Amino acid sequence: MQSIEAQRKIEPFIVFFVIASTQIGSGFLVFQRTVAKSAGYDAWIAVIIAGIMTHIVMFLIYKMLKEEGADLASIHQQVFGKWLGGLFNLLFVGYFCYGLLTVTRTYIELVQVWMFPDLNVFLFTLFFFVLVFYAVNSGLRVIGGLSFFSIVLPLYLIFIFLFILPYTDFRNFFPIYDHSIKEILQATKDLTVVMIGYEIILVFYPFIKNGQQSKKWAHFGLLFTTLIYLYTTVLSFAFFSEEQLKETIWPTLSMLKIVELPFIERFEYIGVINWNIIIIPNVCIYLWCASRLLKRTVKIQQRKSVVGLLFIILLIIPQLETRYQVDKLDDYFSDIGFIINYLYIPLLFVLLSIVRKVKKRQ
Amino acid sequence: MGFFFKKGNKQPKLKEQYSEETDTAPAKSKDEKESSYYNSETNLHFSIRYISTIVDQDIIQKNILPYLLDKQFASIADVKKILPIEDVQIETNEALIEEKLFNGYLVLKVHTDKQHVAFIAAKEVIVRSLSMPEVETSVIGPKEAFIEAIDQNINLLRIRLPVKELMIEEFTIGSVSKTRTALMYIDDIANMENVNTMRQRLQAIDFDQINDSSYIEQLTADNKNSPFPQFLDTERPDRAAGVLVEGKVVVLVDGSPHALIGPTNLVEFFSSPEDYLFNWITASILRLIRLFAVVFSILITPMYVAVLTYHYELIPKDLTATLITSRQVIPFPPILEALILELTIELLREAGARLPTKIGQTIGIVGGIVIGTASVEAGLTSNVLLILVALAALASFITPVYKMGNAIRFLRFPFLLFAQLLGLLGIVFCLLIVITHLLRLTSLGRPYLEPIYPPRWRDLKDSFIRLSFDKQIRRPSYVQAQKEIRFNPKHQKRRHDIEE
């Protein structure tokens, strides 16, 4: 087992912020439309079910990580052996990079639509990646700090949303439960992929001081995001009519458009720039995890692989030009994320338990 | 008989016995003096050597020579007995001679004993008297500041903390300047890890000259490529004594009227010693105003540039109208306008700092009123921006620690640049870079952003706000003091019920 210096480790409660910040990304701005499509105003039930799902998966993850110093690479090695396990590690590296690419490109799309239609994508990405590189290069402690700020600084938006209360109608929710279970489950599936990201704990778990103590914080993080999602869902369902919601691409930002302060008129601008703070730790943690897994698999220095990965993605991003491409990017990421979180991780859990049992018998 | 003999010899004819030898060493400084004497009572020939410019001639004439010439001075070991001077060392090591000589010691050699040398302290210390603090002025509270002499400064601290636990370790740093540097801490309060770190860093310094404590600060900083100071410096003994009791370490440097304090954190730079003199409500509000001023001073001009370059629609139309009218005749884009004004302010500030006080004031008036009004009238800058820049400059002066004020002064320019490139998004970019940088920083290995990150509720009581003294039961947690509890809260008066 590799040993990690105590100084490099993060405190258990930081896991709360890391988990919460990875779950709130660009998906947070768009999810209402997708869920309303399948379950209408009953989709808030789906939010709760999806929240419970994340808790279950997190429970499995912590069960897997119970062994001293375990992480995704060591689990893969235990279950699949050196070569096949390494291959799976590389697949995860690909997944994290894809996540990094998706989050960044979706944010750029957001900036293009809401702020700068003729943004120079390459230059913007370059700036963005310089910042990401600086943060990742400083280590997990700094990334944890950024996660903290990405939760705390935009927290005021919760209260800003209250400005729309005069324009809401909570009778929209009635009658409750007029959609079939199938429709609600479809909405749940759509939501679960918005709330992914917490699986990164499989990689950075060895860097948490007293790992198992962080369990409750991880669950608190999930609970926090579930509540935030529920809050926005309820508000936007009360604000939009069902038909309108199906036509609105960015309901969260459209809601912010209503807000008017004496010195700020277009509040959605503030929303867009706030989202920069929110996605930065998201991107950083994906990159960190990818480089860490690469190091665990093929022994490339993290410092080098971080630069390499960023460079590759920097070249890919300007190639994705149209809205359609970005949408497809998102869709694929959702599908892969769903498979990994809700099929692969439970499967891995079962396999790992069998392997551990067999070993115990021997 | 001997009594009379002695009496008769009480006025030694120094001049007669004095014979100058000027032809010994080849390269000898003009002020290096060496002379031989003869004690007639014990038939002892001896010679003294000293640097005339750093020894006190009075001490030699009154406290050393009369005794050496009259008393029972038979061997070098007697020196300790007969001289009324405490600091007398008898050594066999010839190599020490040079060092001691240039530290104000008299080197005494006896002709019969070639092995031993005596060093007698006779240093002349020229000390200016205590004066008022000039950088950290305060309306109320103690009015004395450190001076350039380390012993005086230690004295100022010792008087405030008369306990045996106040430890002083001394180092000589600088291969040429041989600067005396003192590391101070309270033994049973300070965390030894902090003390050891500081000691190691002081010992590791390899530099030729230490002119001021700022040299030490830069040479021992955790991150040398940061605009932010990582040690707090103060010229106030009350502040230094205060942080010693909190469990921090203080470094005093000879020749520097500023003490260094570590570990520290970002928020501490915005606290003034006066905060502890007002009641806690006033002090807390003042601190909050100060922090607001800092944010305002960094962000206001970049916001102006961002809004006027990219986001006209962000602000209400009445406000837009005001801004547009004031910019109607300005031929420059907002960024150029802002840069011109910011640079003017920086020039004025620099000029004001470099010039003698009286002229400095004049420059301030000329710059502030004449240049400001004239440039608005000439249509080079808008008056709204003039107001903003002036306010920002004013706000940046609020920082109680001068070095932090400078860092904030510098920060505005990258923000301006990013605001021009990407508008508000650029400002957020820059903010994130600064936050990341601050997250990386440590002071003596302790996180710099504490108590914000890592979040410590306990330390909030003396950071953005300052709660009353009876709430300050524990010392700040980032210092990790040995004794965390400042006082036993049980001794406090229990709160009475309404009718009791």
Image (cartoon, rainbow, N blue to C red):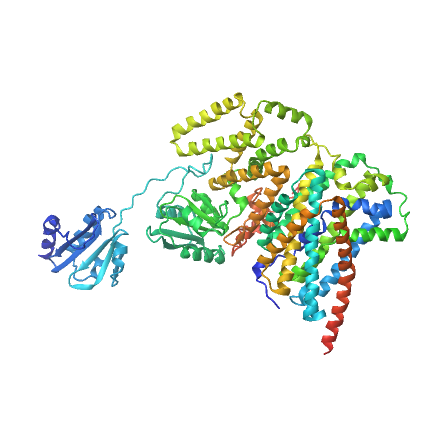
State the image coordinates of residue A240 (x, y, percent, origin top left). 82, 39
Residue A261 placement: quadrant: top right
Residue found farthest to the front: A319
Nearest the viewer among A57 and A104 is A104
Nearest the viewer among B181 and B362 is B362
Nearest the viewer among A354 and A308 is A308
Is A219 drawn above or below residue A161 in the view shown?
below
Is A262 drawn above or below residue A49 in the view shown?
above
Say which residue appears at 51% left-offset and 48% top-offset: B264
State the image coordinates of residue B7 (x, y, percent, origin top left). 11, 52
- Where is the N terminus of chain A found, in terms of image quarters? bottom right
Report the number of numbered marks: 0
Residue found farthest to the bottom: A362
Q: Is residue A233 left or right of residue B499?
A: right
Q: Is residue B280 left or right of residue A96?
A: left
Residue B206 placement: quadrant: bottom left
Q: Is residue A205 left or right of residue B271?
A: right
State the image coordinates of residue A329 (x, y, percent, origin top left). 74, 50
Q: Determine if residue B284 is in view.
A: no
Q: Determine if residue B95 is in view.
A: yes
Is A157 drawn above or below residue B102 in the view shown?
above
Say which residue appears at 25% left-offset and 63% top-offset: B92
- Where is the C terminus of chain A found, in terms of image quarters? bottom right
Residue B329 placement: quadrant: top right
State the image coordinates of residue A98 (x, y, percent, origin top left). 70, 54
Q: Is residue A190 left or right of residue B380?
A: right
